[in-house]
Amino acid sequence: MGVLLSGYIATQYIALDSAHAQQSVGFREYIDFFDGYSLRYPQNWIQVKGAGADIFFRDPFVLDENLSVDISSPSSSRFKSVEDLGPPEEAGKRVLKQYLTEFMSTRLGVRRESNVLSTSSKLADDGRLYYLVEVNIKSYANNNELAVMPQDRVVRLEWDRRYLSVLGVENNRLYELRIQAPENVFQDEENDLRQVMDSFRVNKITA
């Protein structure tokens, strides 16, 4: 096992059921004992340091396909349950607003089209309640935003991405697993990405 500052990555691959075997390349498990969460991620993804999240993994070939975990500050949050966010629908609006704020652009001629595709809750095998949110965001931009004539400003699709979030609460903190993938990639790798979502757990920190 390779020891990390706040957790470890198990070197063994996790066996997959036969329904997913042909589409998957296997998973590794990441456990963060210091901050209190665990997940599985595709074994060919690489960890990126200094990405601004508690942990960040990405596909080495499709850079827009990645996952990260964000955790609320222990000094400014007193969450008791994910239900503190309201029902899943309200959590979905919060997640979408956060994404749009982060992707805000000051470029002329940029337009974002966004939709909350689904929101739900699940009681996992650890007895905790989690919220699941799926969002699609498309970004459009003019090919020549400084052109004087409207016909010279042709709108084109810059990117089209699926965002999957899993929200959980433990240790008085809100945890969010975020998965991002281009829509065309998501269609091919949906089974794997949903397994990552299903694997996310928050854990009580024992001092």
Image (cartoon, rainbow, N blue to C red):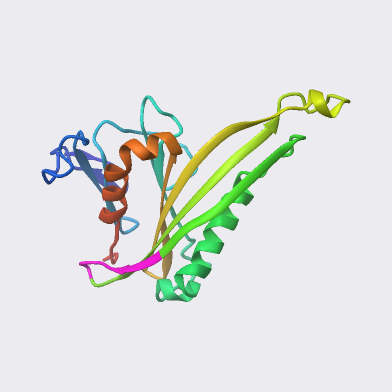
Q: Percent from the top left, x then y, of residue 143?
A: 71, 25
In the picture shown, does residue 184 fall above or below 104?
above
Is 65 part of what is drawn in magenta?
Answer: no
Determine the residue positioned at 61% across, 44% down: 103
Q: Is residue 26 above or below residue 76?
A: above
Residue 128 versus residue 161 in the image, above or below:
below
Q: How many marks?
A: 0
Rendered location of residue 152, percent (x, y): 80, 23
Q: In screen coordinates, is 140 left or right of 61?
A: right
Q: Which residue occupies the foreground of this view, 167 or 153?
A: 153
Q: Is residue 33 visible?
A: no
Looking at the figure, which quarter contains the N terminus? top left
Specify whether residue 91 is in view.
Answer: yes
Q: Residue at x 76, y 24 (%)?
A: 144
Quarter of the figure with residue 16:
top left
Q: Magenta residues? A: 120-126
Q: In the current view of this chain or complex, which residue is farthest to the right? A: 148
Closer-to-camera residue (69/95): 95
Quadrant for residue 120, please give it. bottom left
Above-or-below relation of 155 to 205: above
State which quarter of the image contains the C terminus.
bottom left
Give the residue furthest to the front: 151
Q: Nearer the viewer, residue 173 or 144?
A: 144
Residue 147 locus on image (x, y percent): 84, 24
Tell which of 99 and 118 is nearer to you.
118
Residue 127: where, in percent of width, then height?
24, 72
